[in-house]
Image (spheres, rainbow, N blue to C red):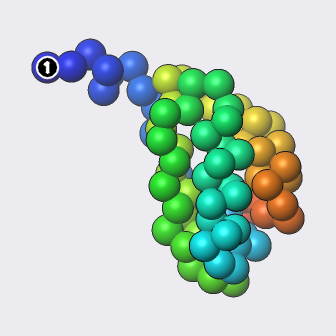
Amino acid sequence: MSSESQSTARATYLVTGLTCDHCARAVADELRSLAGVSNVTVQLVPGGHSAVTVVSAAPLTAAAVVAALDEAGEYQVANGS
């Protein structure tokens, strides 16, 4: 068994403002640039709440996620996610 799976955090955020694949790539690229992030997947829902899942070495702070989304464009974590 790999100890890697025990030392990772996975979080899914519902993100608004994504309308196309370019948006999804921009968000994924910004989140991947955060320290400790090993994988980002985006389930695009154009104009709705897209599910963005981040795998990282440790849980990310809400401020880090918000800053990465802001840097990528006009994307926001939906209330309640």
Task: Give the residue type at disc 1.
Answer: Met
Above or below 61: residue 66: below
Above or below 12: residue 24: below
Residue 66: image location, x then y, percent: 79, 47
Is label 1 in a helix, a strand or a loop? loop
Q: Which residue is mark 1?
A: 1
Bin the neighbour count of mark 1 within 10 Å (Cα to Cα): few under 14, some 14-19, many 20 and up.
few
User: Observer-nearest residue: 80 or 48?
Assistant: 48
Above or below 75: residue 30: above
Above or below 53: residue 43: below
Is residue 13 visible to the viewer in this orientation of the structure? no
Residue 50: image location, x then y, percent: 59, 70
Q: Residue at x 57, y 25 (%)?
A: 36
Horizontally, residue 81 falls left or right of residue 72, namely left
**Quadrant of the frame with the C terminus:** bottom right
**Residue 32 falls in which quadrant of the image?**
top right
Q: Residue at x 63, y 82 (%)?
A: 46
